[in-house]
């Protein structure tokens, strides 16, 4: 089984841990089970915000229907605290895809998202093409978000996939289900990329073996 390392990045308090936990805890559930769980959790108090120290790793298996790949997914929940910036190169090592989370309700969220996209995704992950980057506008307050936030402008976001998400109280279940749709789109491109890399490595090994 191939391992897909996905770095979940963004500013402090953007909701990265909430996204990583939601995906990891619901990955094995059916839509009906996930909906029932969401209804049960709606009555519970909102958890207190706990900033991530360094990085957390959430693991789960996911079958990507569009490619037939069965992946061991590692979500690396990277702290938004800039005090850990010196550790970014180690965290980005071997990264196959990126989920960039930002809170459109926070002042300066767009500029912060651009900094993360540039300094982490673009500079630290070699050969990361646009198809392996997903940007999530995550509404953190209660109540439903608009149908879609305005996409982030600028060349760094011009060709990447952008989506609106909400997993808090009052959020429509459709938004929660859509998170998995976005994850599966990302994993489909990652699994295809991994397959191509494995094929290229096998071919290279065959060529080197033939030269001996």
Image: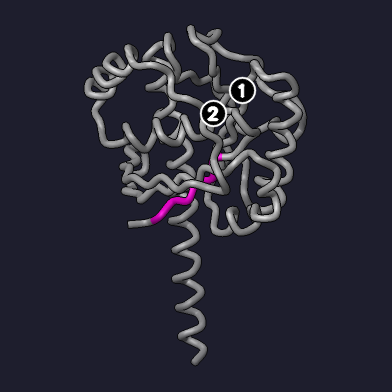
Q: Residue at x 61, y 59 (%)?
A: 90
Name the main secondary structure of what is drawn in magenta. Answer: strand
Furthest residue to the bottom? Answer: 212
Q: Is residue 204 magenta?
A: no
Task: Relative to 205, say whether 71 is above or below.
Answer: above
Which part of the image, by quadrant, shows the N terminus? bottom left
Disc 1 and disc 2 in contact, CB within 8 angstroms: yes
Q: Residue 98: name its quadrant.
A: top right
Q: Residue 82: name its quadrant.
A: top right
Which of the labelled discs sits on residue 15, or is there none? 2
Q: Is residue 189 left or right of residue 151?
A: left
At mark 2, the secondary structure is loop
- In this figure, which residue is indicated by the disc labeled 1? 103
Task: Relative to 101, say whether 192 is above or below.
Answer: below
Q: Residue at x 57, y 13 (%)?
A: 148
Q: Residue at x 23, y 20 (%)?
A: 32
Instruction: Give the colour scheme of this rendering.
Output: one colour
Which stretch appears magenta?
A: 3-8
List x then y, in percent, for residue 212: 49, 92
Q: Is residue 11 left or right of residue 38?
A: right
Residue 131 shows in the view: no
List x then y, in percent, for residue 100: 59, 35
Q: Between marks 1 and 2, how big is the CA–CA gap? A: 7 Å
Which residue is at the front of the view, 161 or 105? 105
List x then y, in percent, for residue 192: 45, 49
Tell me which numbered mark, 1 or 2, is placed earlier along the sequence. Answer: 2
Specify few, some or many for label 1: CA neighbours under 10 Å numbering under 14, 14-19, or 20 or more: many
List x then y, in percent, for residue 85: 69, 49
Q: Residue at x 45, y 17 (%)?
A: 168
């Amino acid at each position: 089984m191939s391992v897909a390392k996905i770095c979940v990045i963004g500013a402090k308090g953007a909701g990265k841990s909430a996204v990583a936990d939601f995906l990891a805890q619901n990955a094995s559930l059916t839509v009906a089970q996930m909906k029932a769980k969401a209804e049960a959790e709606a009555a519970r108090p909102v958890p207190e915000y706990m900033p991530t120290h360094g990085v957390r790793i959430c693991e789960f298996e996911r079958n990507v229907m569009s490619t037939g790949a069965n992946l061991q997914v590692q979500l690396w929940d990277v702290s938004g605290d800039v005090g850990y910036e010196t550790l970014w190169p180690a965290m980005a090592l071997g990264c196959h895809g990126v989920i960039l989370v930002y809170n459109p309700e926070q002042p300066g969220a767009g500029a912060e998202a651009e900094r993360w996209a540039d300094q982490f995704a673009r500079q630290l992950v070699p050969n990361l093409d646009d198809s392996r980057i997903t940007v999530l506008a995550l509404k953190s307050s209660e109540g439903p978000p608009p149908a879609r936030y305005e996409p982030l402008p600028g060349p760094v976001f011009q060709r990447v996939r952008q989506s609106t998400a909400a997993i808090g109280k009052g959020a429509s279940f459709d938004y929660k289900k859509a998170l998995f749709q976005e994850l599966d789109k990302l994993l489909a491109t990652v699994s295809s990329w991994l397959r191509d890399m494995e094929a290229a490595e096998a071919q290279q090994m065959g060529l080197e073996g033939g030269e001996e």
